[in-house]
Image (cartoon, rainbow, N blue to C red):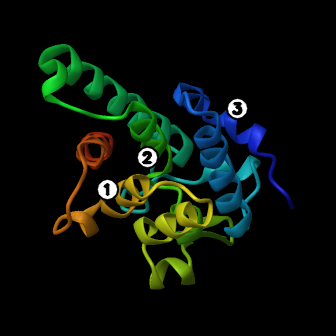
Amino acid sequence: MKIDSKKIRDLLPEIELIKQGDLRDRVAETWADAVEQGGWSLEDLGSIPFTLLIQDCRFDLVHHTRAVTKTAVAIARTLKENYGDAVTLDMDLLVAGSLLHDVGKLLEYAKEGGSVVKSRKGVLLRHPLSGQALAYKHGLPFEILNMIAYHSKEGDLGKRTVEGIIIHHSDFVNFEPLKG
C-alpha cells in the first residue's frame, strides 16, 4: 500500500522545522518508503518500540524520533547561544538527520505473531546501514547519510560532523536513562 508522505508530516511535525522544501519532502518520502518496504502501515507506527533492547519498551519509534529531534535542536540552540560562530552547524541538516537517524528500524524490525522482532533484514544489516541506504535512494546529502550511518556504535570509529555528534548524543540521552 502506498504511504502518503503528507501523513508522515502529520506524525513527525518537526519536519516543518526544515526550511528547505525539497529536503523536507525527501525526509517525508524516505519515511514513507521505509514504512512501505518494512511492510508496516501508518497505524502500526504507534506499536513499534524504539528499541528491542528494553523489554516491554513503553515508547514507540515515532515518539523516540521526535524526542531525539527536539533534544538535538535544543542542544544546537544552546551551543549557538553560548559559543556563537565558534560552532558552525546547519539546522536543516541537523533536523533532517535527527528525523532519519532510526528510519532503518522500519526494515530492521518485523511484526511476527503480534510481537515486534528483529527481521531477517535486521539480522543481516542493522538500522544505521539500512537507514543510510534508504536516505541515499532518496537523494539526501552525504552529510545526512553520515549522520544516519554513524549515530550509533557503528560510527564510533568514523568521522562525525558537528550535527552528527549532536544526534549521536541526543539519541543516547533518549535511550540510556530508559534502560533501567
Name the outermost residue toward the top.
81
Is 158 left, or right, of 2 in this rendering? left
| Residue plotted at (12% across, 27% down) | 86
Q: Residue 82's spot in the image, x, y percent?
A: 14, 16
Q: Residues within 10 Å of mark 2 (few under 14, many from 20)?
A: many
User: In the image, is residue 84 above or below residue 109?
Assistant: above
SS label for mark 1: loop
Question: Sequence-wise, which precedes: disc 3 or disc 2?
Answer: 3
Neighbour class for label 3 at 10 Å: few (<14), some, many (≥20)?
few
Return the residue at label 1: 151
Please tell me which residue is depicted at 16% across the width and 69% down the height of the picture: 157
Q: For residue 108, which numbered disc appears in the image?
A: none
Front residue (pair 116, 79)? 79
Residue 166 rendering spot, x and y as whole percentages: 26, 40
Report if the CB atoms under discs 2 and 1 are less than 8 Å apart: yes
Q: In the rendered image of this protein, does residue 12 appear above or below residue 154?
A: above
**Which residue is label 3 attached to?**
10
Quarter of the figure that contains the N terminus: bottom right
Return the x and y of residue 125 as percentages of the image width and height: 45, 79
Foreground mark, 2 or 1, reads 2
Total numbered badges shown on the rendered structure: 3
Q: Where does the image place residue 18, in percent across and percent down from the top left?
A: 53, 31
Q: Secondary structure at mark 2?
A: helix
Kind of residue at badge 3? Asp
Q: Residue at x 45, y 50 (%)?
A: 57
Q: Which quadrant would residue 156 be assigned to in this image?
A: bottom left
Three-letter residue code for mark 2: Gly
- Where does label 2 land, which residue? 97
